[in-house]
Amino acid sequence: MRILLSGATGLVGQAWQQSAAHQGHEVLRLRHGQSDNPEDITWNPESGIDAPERLEGLDAVIHLAGENIADGRWTAAKKKRIRDSRVQGTQLLAATLAERAQPPGILICASGINYYGSQGDQELNEDAAPGEDFLARVCRDWESACQPLYKCGTRIVNLRIAMVLSAEGGALKKMLLPFKLGLGGPIGDGSMYMSWITLEDLVRAINFCLNSTDISGPVNAASPNPVSNREFTKALSKALKRPAFLPAPRPMLKLVLGEMAEALLMPSIRAVPEKLLSAGFAFRHPRLDDALHTLLHRTK
């Protein structure tokens, strides 16, 4: 397939490109700023795409680009970048693709399980109601920004991605040092649910959606076995053979990290991948203990 990829330098984008190379896909990368690589198409999400004619005749688009939400405190300017990079960037890309004589057959656009907001211990399939906090509104508008391509008959998949586990980057890598030092622990009482997926299973889920023509709309990219924060802490400490008994009080996290702590660390989101399972997708790492053991063993 001839596939356009945005967010190519991120954790997921790099891993997916390795998979694409094994499958023989031709991958064009949508890159912000200047690039000397002939495989790259440059763009500015606020102003436009250079040489949009190169987007003609694509088989698929995988759109992963967006401001890093876990990097730095959430000032007003940071929140604007988080929203604009996703909503405005997707609107521009979808509208530009819709103008092609031959639009792509499928657009897989990243979203997040934060679409649901914090809903306690309620299981959340793809039909669950959206939340009302900042990230929930961003995810809702992010998914709606794909609208121009619906009219072209393009199959749209909004991949609501859970916390991605990889020892090479992302949230897990940030947790490893404090846990190895014995400084890990639950957040508050540890009762909030955490939805997660290994990087390997996320890449496989993207490829599964590419090739499964009956999958469309929102798709939860999350393990079928979400866990409480307390259970996650216990599993990681066991995998590292380190104690983890120092709780992180919610007020302290809020003081140190501001609004980001409330949005990323404290919500309880129990997402279940109903669409993937119904379509026959088989997770390689459905359970957290096995996933962490595999990831940390590979790293060693």
Image (tube, helix red, strand yellow):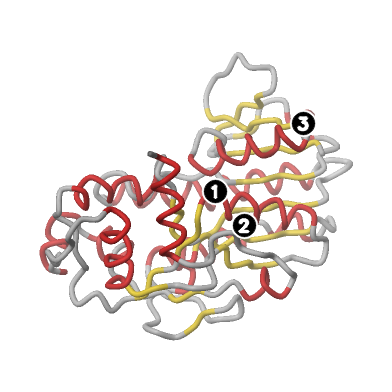
Left or right of 120 on screen, residue 156:
right
Q: Judge by depth and name the residue closer to the eye, 266 or 99.
A: 266
Q: Which residue is mark 1?
A: 88
Local secondary structure at mark 3: strand
Q: Amino acid at mark 1?
A: Gln
Give, as a three-letter code, the residue at label 3.
Glu
**Looking at the image, is mark 3 or mark 2 earlier in the sequence?**
3
Q: Is residue 241 left or right of residue 15?
A: left
Q: Determine the CA span between mark 1 and mark 2.
A: 8 Å
Q: Quadrant of residue 233?
A: bottom left
* Figure disc tally: 3
Q: Give the vertical position of 5 relative to 238 (above or below).
A: above
**Residue located 31% across and 76% down the image:** 192
What's the residue at 69%, 60% (across, down)? Answer: 157
From the top left corner, tell me how far across and down residue 83 is, in percent: 45, 53
The residue beneath circle 2 is: 145
Q: Nearer the viewer, mark 1 or mark 3?
A: 3
- Of residues 90 and 158, the one nearer the viewer is 158
Pointer 3 and pointer 2: residues touching (CB < 8 Å)?
no
Q: On screen, 15 above or below 69?
A: above
Foreground residue among 119 and 47: 119
> Which SS class for mark 1?
helix
Residue hosting label 3: 26
x, y percent for residue 181: 15, 48
Mark 3 vs mark 2, CA separation in Å: 26 Å
Q: Residue at the spot x=69%, y=48% of the render?
A: 94
Q: Residue furthest bottom?
A: 122
- Crowdedness near tag 2: few (<14), some (14–19) or many (≥20) residues, C-alpha within 10 Å: many
- First-in-chain label (1 vs 2): 1
Question: Badges 1 and 2: C-beta atoms under 8 Å apart?
Answer: yes
Q: Is residue 14 left or right of residue 170?
A: right
Which is nearer the N-term, disc 1 or disc 3? Answer: 3
